[in-house]
Image (cartoon, rainbow, N blue to C red):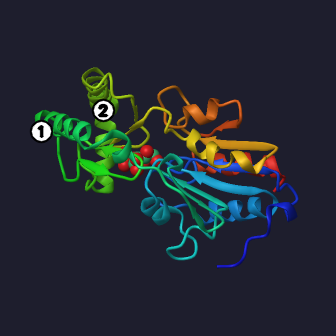
Amino acid sequence: MSTPVPFSQRPQGDVICLFDVDGTLTPARRSASPAMLEVLKQVREKAVIGFVGGSDLAKITEQLAIHGQDISGDFDFCFAENGLTAIKLGQALPSESFIQWIGEEKYKKLVRFILHYIADMDIPIKRGTFIEFRAGMINVSPIGRNASVNERDEFEKYDKVHKVRAAFVDALKKEFADYGLTYSIGGQISFDVFPDGWDKRKGLERIAGENFREIHFFGDKTYQGGNDYEIYEDPRTIGHSVTCPEDTQRELKKLFNL
Ligand code: M1P
C-alpha cells in the first residue's frame, strides 16, 4: 500500500468528498467500474475522499476494493455501517456497539417480533439470513440476505408494488415505539435498524476535528426516508443528489475540472 500524500500537500486538501456506496459509487451491491475508480483516484490527488456506506465493511470492500482485499489504502476515510466502523488513513478508529446500546433483553424481544413477522409474511420466495447482526445496527430482510442477484431484482420490483418493507417498518415502529430506533430502507431487499442519530451523520462526527473548509456529500437516496437524507440535508455538508455512478462521475468532473 503506497503512503498517501498528506492532506496539507494536496491542492484542495481542506476539501473532502464523502460518498454513499450503493447507487452512488456502484450499482446496488455490485462492483465499482474502472471508470469510477479512476475518477476517484484523480479526485484524491486534489482533495480528500471517503465513503460512508450503510453496509458492513466486508461488503463494501467487495464492491470497492482496488488493491485486492484492503480498501483502506484507497480512501482517506472509510465509514461502514453509517460510520460506526471507521478507518482514517489505514488506522481503525474506535467503534460503537448496537448490542451494548440496546441490551440483550430488549434485543431478544425485537428479534422475536421480527422473526414471527417474517414467518407470517406471504411473499413470492424466501431464502435465508433474515436478520444480519452487525456492530452498529441490525439489517432485516424479508426475502433473506442469501437471495441471488436475480432474486434481489425481483424482490425489489415486488416491493415497489406491494410495499412490504414499509408495512414491516410501520409495524415495528408501533410495537417498539419506546425503543428509540430508526428504520432505514437503503437498499433492494432489506432495511437497517439502528439507534436514533446513528445515521450517516456519524461520519460527520468522525471528521469534526479535521476542520475541512468544505464537506461535499454525494448520495442517491437523499429524499426523506432515504438513508442519505440526514447527511445530505445537514448544514455541515454541501449535498449532491445523484442518480447513478455515472452521474457521480459527471458531478466530480465538474467540481474538480477533471
Ligand atoms: O448501502 C445500502 C444498503 O445496502 C444493502 O441493502 P440491500 O441488501 O437491501 O440491497 C445493505 O447492506 C444495507 O444495510 C445498506 O443500507
Q: Position of residue 132 (x, y in %)?
A: 30, 51
Q: Would residue 112 appear left or right of 164 to someone viewing this image?
A: left
Q: Which residue is mark 2?
A: 165
Above or below: residue 47 compared with residue 171: below
Q: How many marks?
A: 2
Which element is circle 1 on? helix
2 or 1: tag closer to the N-terminus: 1
Q: Quadrant of the C terminus?
A: bottom right
**Kind of residue indicated by mark 1:** Ala
Q: Position of residue 235 (x, y in %)?
A: 70, 30
Residue at the spot x=67%, y=38% of the render? 240
Q: Which mark is residue 119?
A: 1
Judge by depth and name the residue closer to the eye, 225 or 178.
178
Residue at the spot x=25%, y=56% of the render? 146
Q: Is the shortest distance between ligand 1 and the CB of mark 2 under 8 Å? A: no
**Kind of residue indicated by mark 2:** Arg
Q: Which mark is residue 136?
A: none
- Residue farthest to the bottom? 1
Which quarter of the figure has residue 86? bottom right
Q: Would residue 192 appear left or right of 220 to someone viewing this image?
A: left
Q: CA distance from mark 2 to mark 1?
A: 14 Å
Circles 2 and 1: CB atoms closer than 8 Å: no
Above or below: residue 173 compared with residue 185: above
